[in-house]
Amino acid sequence: MTQAPERYMGGGLPRKEDPNLVTGRANWTDNIKLPGMVHLAMLRSPFARAKVTKLDVSGALERPGVVGAFTGQELADQWPGGVPCGAQVSDQQKTPFFPPLVTDEVRHVGDVVAVVVASDRYTAQDALEAIVVDYDPLPPVVNMEAALAEGAPLVHEDLGTNECFKYTAGVEGMDELFDAPDDTQQEGGGVRGPNVGGQGDTNEALRRADVVIKERYIQQRLLPTAIEPRAVVASPEPGHEGIVMYSSTQIPHLAKIVLSLSTGIPENQIRVVAPDVGGGFGSKLNVYREEIIAVVLAKKLGMPIKYVEDRSENYQATIHGRGQIQDIELAANSDGKILGLRVKLLDDMGAYLQLLTPAIAISGAALFPGVYNFENFAIEIKGVFTNLTPTDAYRGAGRPEACYAIERAMDSLAHELGMDPAEVRRRNFFEPFDEPTANPAGLEYDSFNLQGVLERAIELADYEALRQEQQRRRESGDPVQLGIGFSTYTEICGLGPSQALAGLGIGGAGWEAANVRMLVTGKVEVATGTSPHGQGHETSWSQIAADVLGVTPDDVDVIHGDTDAVPFGRDTYGSRSLAVGGIAVYHAANKVVEKGKKIAAHMLEASEDDIEFEGGRFSVAGSPDQNVTIQDVAGAAYLAASLPEGMEPVLNETSIYDPPNFTFPFGAHICVTEVDTETGKVKLRDYIAVDDCGPVINPTIVDGQLHGGLAQGIAQALYEGVVYDEEGNLVTASMVDYMIPGAPELPNFTLDRTVTPSPSNPLGVKGVGEAGTIGAPPAVINSIVDALSPLGVKHVDMPASPMRVWKAIQNAQGKQSGDRQIDASLGASGADIRQGR
Amino acid sequence: MIPVAFDYEVAESVDHAIELLGQYGDESKLLAGGHSLIPIMRLRLAAPSVLIDLGRLENLRYVRDGGDHLKIGALTRHRDLAFNDMVAEHCGIVGYTAGLLGDPSVQHRGTIGGTLSHGDASGDMPSVITALEGSIVIQGPNGERVVKAADFFQDYMVTDLGEQEVVTEVRVPKLGQNTGWSYKKFARRSQDWAMVGVAAVVERSNGSIGSARIALTAMGATPIRATSVEQALSGASPDAVVEAAQSADEGTSPASDAAASAEFRRHLARVWTQRAVEEALSR
């Protein structure tokens, strides 16, 4: 009898990655030392917008140890493609040329003017001071609404406008009810998203509504702040024509293509390796100018070159996240049923378009309706250039923005109607379903049971008792008030169906590749095109392969992050890895079993149809004693001494999996805050998150993803926010000023799960990497507003710093009407622009 | 985040440190725990050409009983103060505040003499020593002198310390049974500098307040005594605290920055003074 092995999927296997990480034996890019390696340093602009009138690097060349110093003029012919943007979200999108080194004008603080190559990093850094640059400073554009005004200075004069693109769906006549007049200078732009459509007639919905919630929300800019800053080593590959680039990147495979497009080096002469990568959160879903410069100079000088950014550069020059102004109108009847939703977004591009900059807001566009089933939806998005650091994907990338807007508006609706915020949600939820169902934007959600997650969260929170405590505190005039905030969310994961990605303006190719091979000794190698940077793929993919093949996870080695070792891949971002790459592993492993079955039948002299496979053994149906192990089969396949006629040797199977749909995890979060009304300080007392990401492969890893995601979502709500001054200088330029919370600032999270499998893939899995950052911000802000609503507070912008909360209380009490106050310091920009210094 | 090149000298004794200071002049900086100096060097906001490391002067790490006061060696680390029994018994506010400074790694490296010499008005310990009316022992080429805390902090990051002088000891009074204390630090994150801090040392006398000494953190260029609150509380009933605290920001000049406006800091100083005095009275 064969014994069924332990099933590994669903178990909290300790992460294979951790021993190296926690004992300092990880292989970071900065640990790479190649013979003859030299070091690169960047001369960065101190101005947000200025003409470069003189640039002389000769002083740097005189410094001992300096190998070279270069300007944009000298290297311009090395990067015909500049820093490529991979997104085209409308036919009229304006895509400026993005030079790795500027030639005449700097466009944000941190823009790169010149570079020095020297024998060590210190020498390179010091030599920057010997470069002479004269700047003619120009007035910068630091505010999105000002950027679109008549006569505004232009970030790119050759484009003739600061409007990068306009994207619309279902907007006919929409401006009639929005106060802000539209500029009609650029019509349409062509809606490219096949599943992102406006539906119905929002004008009519707003006219017949009993209540219209009209709000402006600000998505502040955020700094992704991976623990390992960006790092790159570029080297002429010994014995080859080409170049190898080691980089702390999420996207070795995409980088190989983008580097080729930028530099003209043939793609087959570029190898990209992502060694251990210390976090990315989307910020390493990019190919940066520094990588291109390193590659170009390594080739030009014939030497390995290392560049490691410091934290100051990380904050100035790595992409920022978010940066949206959201004007929304939510129409509902007095029973709380939503009639329609309209959204107008301004999305801050920054000074240049990075890899996916214009696509970020678009990727969240169809999620503004959230988890609610109604009919009328319209959206307009304008991308705006500013003289600030470029924005791009940051954990959630478009979805936290959408979730925040609808979830804040739902609370405002509940407040307006005097309804419980849980009840107004219940009344608009989709009924449970397990077959694709269209949302108001036409997006096909895969499976929901919203009632399950919300009721479980309410039970875990002991909601009734909390409301009673809140009432007691209100009645006693306690200076510390209790807040209870809800957020019920969904998100798009599993990027994605290639055709749909093409529709979003990002080319396509949402598939993922996996190769599963069994060696002669029976051990297993899984080569995956996903590129983990903290997610634990080595562990989870081992669990999947182990269960399919009937081996143990220790028998499986997962290979990733090297375009030579794994030739095809689409890398890791957008909570795609499990639902796409994990499924590719699953399919490839099943192909191994299928081939193994044929060989086993040959070995056991039985018909293939009679072969059963269980627990790592192939046996003949009805004669369990007649069996061979998969290791025996792997050995036979390798030796090929006796194989079925015409069969190729070796168990070595590849799957390239293109998913039929995205996946849509969902959840209900409840945040309990204690708000000190005298100081504005918010204490998180409890945070309950009930998430449904389908069946879980490794619960420990999923819990970890939620802990980290919640921390980052809470950070956006309470702590983090980029501040610029009016000159475009980054005020929050260090970790002293940019408030990343630590463990002391966070509560013990109460996590629970329900399981609603996705119909889109055979494992039913969905994705969980961004759930926390999406669910948390509205739950926290809703909680604060809930605590303060008796004082007349209707909204507090993020991050809800003590001063902002205190001001909201002051404003609410100073104005009997309780009109919503927009924090003046936020001005009209996604970035927080401070007046004066 | 890459400092300018500098030379490094090790002081073998306080006299040797003074001699090195004389030799290198204002191009040099004393290095104690390094958790204030090194970060500003990495940002190139400071670029001393020589660091004189005091780290090996083990004889400056101590807490001793001085009769009516405690003597604390200048190189005593925050962590050692936070867990020192003599400090806990006689002057708990010093140990408590040492435990609030930065994060554990800062506390394990940073020293009391270093944080006082740095003279940052957002630092917590300067206000605490000011409220305690402690004193600072300084050694220079001409011998030793003792300076009152009130005279030591002169301006933003400017102290009474001369170019060739070294802080060697901090003296704080033993607080009697009838004296309660509180240090209230308002910060967004646990490891942050204080947005506002209030140190209160309050002596109880027959059910009323005998005297109160209150010093404010981050409300001006130096620690500032809330003198009008102190006067209002002298001999007053505990019921007077709420009213008295309303004048806590009198005579202060807080800055406006990304963390808080001057107006908000003034408001916090009033709220926090009330809460600090109330806490001191209950302790």
Image (spheres, coloured by chain):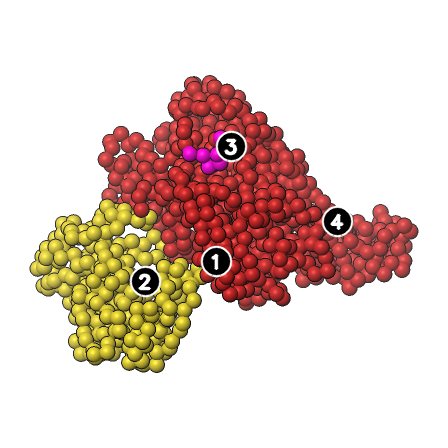
Chain colours: A red, B yellow
Classify residue A19 by image quadrant: bottom right
Left/right placement of residue B88 relative to residue A713 reads: left
Image marks 4 and 3: residues in contact by CB distance under 8 Å: no
Q: Earlier in the sequence, mark 4 or mark 3?
A: 3
- Name the front one of labels 1 and 4: 1
Which image quadrant for residue A177?
top left
Residue density around tag 2, few if under 14, some if 14–19, many if 20 or more, within 10 Å: many
Give the spatial CA distance, label 1 vs label 4.
Answer: 55 Å
The residue at the point 42 percent across, 64 percent down is B4
Residue nearer the viewer, A371 or A233: A233
Q: In the figure, is residue A562 to the left or right of A690?
A: right
Select label 1 or label 2 by which is in front. 1
Disc 3: CA contacts within 10 A as few (<14), some (14-19) or many (>=20): few
Q: Which residue is mark 3?
A: A159
Residue of label 2 = B100
Q: Amino acid at mark 2?
A: Leu
Q: Main secondary structure of the magenta part?
A: loop
Instruction: Have a look at marks 4 and 2 and say if they share a chain.
Output: no
What amino acid is at disc 3? Leu
Residue A338, how many percent across, how many down?
Answer: 46, 27
